[in-house]
Image: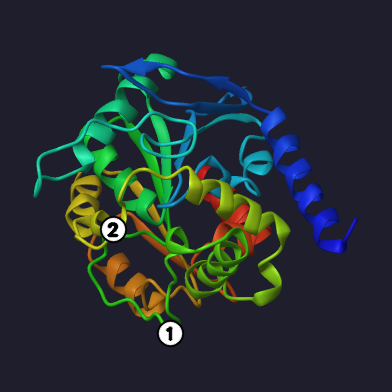
Amino acid sequence: MTQGETEARAATAQIARIDALSTHHDPVHEGVRVRWRRFGTGTAQPPLVLLHGGHGSWMHWLRNAEALSAGRTLWLPDMPGFNESDAPPRVAPGEDTLPPLLAALGGTLDQLVGAGTPIDLGGFSFGGLTAARFAVQRGAVRRFALVGSGGHGTMRRMTAQMINWRAAPDREAERAALLNNLAALMLHDKAAIDALAFEIHDISCHGTRFRSKEVSQSGGLRQALDVLGARGVATLLLWGEFDVTADPRPLVAQLVAEGPGREGTVVDGAGHWAQYERADEVNARLLRFFS
C-alpha cells in the first residue's frame, strides 16, 4: 500500500469516527428529506445549529463537532441539495433559489427541536448568508456566528483560477482539479491540504446539486445583520486572514461598526475554511462566544 493510500484510509476512518459520535435524523418537510446529525446531549444551553458552505456538507465542521458539542447539543445538517439530503424544489428562471431551501431546512429543524425553540446559529461561507436569512425568517435565535460568510457584497481577491472538476476527462484529472480548488479557494497553508481535507472536499463536491455561488455573490448579508441587530441578537463575525473571498480586516471592521452587538475576529494564518485550517483557535473562539 502506498503512502497516499494509507493516508486516504486514515482520512476515511477519521470521518467515520466523528460520524459515529452522532445520531442521524431524516425528517421530511413538504416532500424534502433533510439529513441532520446530532452531536452531544447537553441541555444547559440552547441547541447549536451550524450550516456548511457551498459544495459542502456537514463535514465542513468535522474538526469542530467534538469540541462544540461538549456539554451541549449540536445539530449539523446536509442542507437541501447537498450530500445526503434531497434537493429542494426548483424555482422559475430568475427567481430566488434560497426560499425553498430555507423552508425545508426550517421545517425539518422544527420537527427536531420544536417550532419557536431558541437556538444558537452559525454558518460558513454560503452557509453564512443562508444562516443570516434563516435567522431573520425563523426568529428565536439567541447568538449568531459567521465564519467566512458570503453575501457581504465586497470584492473577492482570488489570485488563482478555479478548475471545473466536473469537466475532467478522468479521475486523475478530477483529483488534480479538486486539489487545485482547495488551494485556490479554501485553504491558505499548503500543508493544510491533507488527505482529510481532500476526502471531505471530494465527497462534498460530488454530492452537491444546488448552485450556491450566485446566492453567495448576490449580497443581502448586511440587511440581515441589521435585522438581527435590531432584535438584540449578539453576533460574531470571523474571517481567516488570507480568506480570498473578501479582504477580511477592513470588512470585519466595517461590519462591526455598522451595527450594535457585533464583535469581529480575524484568524491569523487561516484561509477561507478557517474552522478546518485553524480548528483549535476557531473552536476556542466559538466556545467563548456561545457560552
| Residue 96 appearing in the image | yes
Marks 2/1 in contact by CB < 8 Å: the verdict is no
Which kind of residue does numbered mark 2 sit on? Ser
Residue 23 placement, left or right of 79? right
Q: Residue at x 40, y 57 (%)?
A: 125
Under tag 1, what secondary structure? Answer: loop
What distance separates the C-alpha of mark 2 from that of mark 1? 19 Å
Question: Which of 155/198 is in front?
Answer: 198
Residue 115 placement, left or right of 237? left
Under tag 2, what secondary structure? Answer: helix
Dot 2, how many residues are within 10 Å of its Cα: few (below 14), some (14-19), or many (20+)?
Answer: many
Q: Residue at x 30, y 58 (%)?
A: 213
Task: Give the number of the disc on residue 216.
Answer: 2
Q: Is residue 48 above or below residue 161?
A: above
- Which quarter shows the C terminus? top right
* Colouring method of the image: rainbow
Q: Residue at x 32, y 60 (%)?
A: 150
Q: Say which of marks 2 and 1 sits in front.
A: 1
